[in-house]
Image: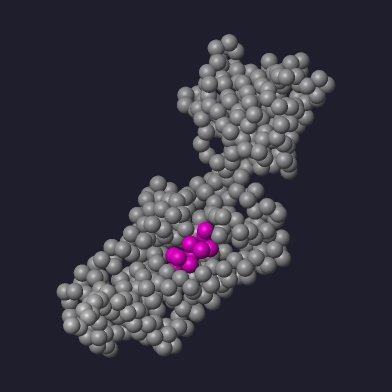
Amino acid sequence: MTAATSYRSTVQAEARDGFGRLLLAEWTKFRTVPRWVLAVVASVALTVLVALLTAAGSASSGTGEGTADPARSEIFDMGHFTYRPLAGDGTVVARVTSQEGGARAKAGLMIRGSAERGTPYAALAVTPGDGVRLQTGYRDGGAGGGAAAPLPRWLRLTRSGTTVTGYESADGRGWRRVGSVRLAGLPRSALAGMFVAAPDDVVVERRFGSESISGEPADTTATFDRVSTAPAQPGAAWRDRGAPGGPAGPATGGRTMSGGTFTLSGYGDIGPNEFADDLTKTVLTGVLIGQTAIVAAAVLFVTAEYRRRMLRTTFAASPRRGRVLAAKAIVAGLVSLAAGLAASFGAMLLAGPVLRSNGVAPPPLWDAAVLRAVLGTGALLGVIAVFAVAVAVIVRRSAPAITMVLLLLLVPQIVATGLPLSAARWLERLTPAAGFAIQQTVTRFDRAIGPWTGFGVLCGYTALALAAAVFLLGRRDA
């Protein structure tokens, strides 16, 4: 009696080995064609070269602020602040009796960690155009707002630990809670007092392919009375923190007192700088040029076999055409991912000394947003290469495929600069060009879509193109 021999299917193993051999074959095709390899190298060189030229141009034109902390250029922390120390929990109360400076001017109360710029704060402000609002951090939004609040208007800020709560009242007796915020890192000894601020008057001119932003500082003046802090600090004098280097004139910042009435004047805003330069994205702008070489290499990787009738041989060796497309997409995507990472890291590292030597502080590479933009740029080129492979299969001709891919990626960004802002945002959200949002590190006034959402839009277009390519591969002759 012979022992039974167990049977083990080898179909799955052969399938895995077959796809692995297919990947190796496609990689061998790619690396043995010098033009394709040179195109990938050229994409890295072009991206880095444009980064160096951009860094040199930014430095020589004086667009950088020369600050040791690049993040500070992304916020406004100006206006005028009159304060006393507030040790531990406590309350500051005041009545705003008059206000000048336009619909967006702010006058109210503030509790903040210190007089240093960029410190955590909570501000309860009366605004002629948007009522009473509780604002914190250097970003948009905040609690409250709505209908304009007639003056005089009572305001109260109360601190309990790291939580600050704002209240407003028409008569100082019946109080309405506006909102509450938590200030991480708020020290026990904080500052409490009154402030005024006003956003700059900014004019944006958009033309096809260019954009210019100009602004003038706006000033504001407000009067306060019935000012009190509790617990009171015996002998604590009122001190001031104003915006340095303001425009000439008596209304640029200061405090006057007459009896129990305070008059504060100042200029500049507290909050996000929606017009700040995104230096990281500017340095990585060379990807717009470098991607042309990546797209050309990815398209030729497919169309060369169509032109030379070699694709029939490939399909004869691997009849499952979807697997062939997958292998080509993976090879092109991984090669482009590696090139994109080399280009983005090289651009940031080499542009840094150029910026620094001219007094412009480069963004730190270890910052979360900057690192996401750099790594995302590599992923961006990888997805663009896969998209180009899919379009090449659909079109089957080199020049039309390259042109189509580049038009879809570049034209929306160029056309958007000549459209009204609302239309420009929709154009950049709904086209493959949304993928370049992954390079954003600053929230600007013209932001169309979030970094990962925009990258997801490009991935969606790529998935649709791949699905169409698979469908057509199975129904057309090679």
In-front residue for pair 334/203: 334
Residue 449 in the figure: left or right of residue 126: left
Q: State whether residue 13 appears in this view.
A: yes
In-front residue for pair 65/327: 327
Residue 15 in the figure: left or right of residue 63: left
Q: Residue at x 29, y 68 (%)?
A: 466
Quadrant placement of the C terminus: bottom left
- In the rendered view, tell whether residue 79 sits above or below residue 316: above
Q: Position of residue 276 (x, y in %)?
A: 58, 50
Q: What stretch of residues is rendered in magenta? A: 372-381
Residue 27 is a magenta residue = no
- In the rendered view, tell whether residue 214 sits above or below residue 150: below
Quadrant placement of the N terminus: bottom left
Q: Residue at x 20, y 83 (%)?
A: 2
- In the rendered view, tell whether residue 279 sits above or below residue 296: above
- In the rendered view, tell whether residue 316 sits above or below residue 86: below
Q: Position of residue 429 (x, y in %)?
A: 38, 53
Q: Position of residue 336 (x, y in %)?
A: 44, 73
Q: Please count the marks in the image.
A: 0
Please identify the dominant SS of the magenta region. Answer: helix
In-front residue for pair 379/211: 379
Q: State whether residue 402 appears in this view.
A: no
Q: Residue at x 75, y 24 (%)?
A: 256
Residue 137 falls in which quadrant of the image?
top right
Residue 91 in the figure: left or right of residue 205: right
Coloured how?
Answer: one colour
Q: Residue at x 37, y 73 (%)?
A: 330
Q: Position of residue 270 (x, y in %)?
A: 62, 38
Question: Residue at the right extreme?
Answer: 235
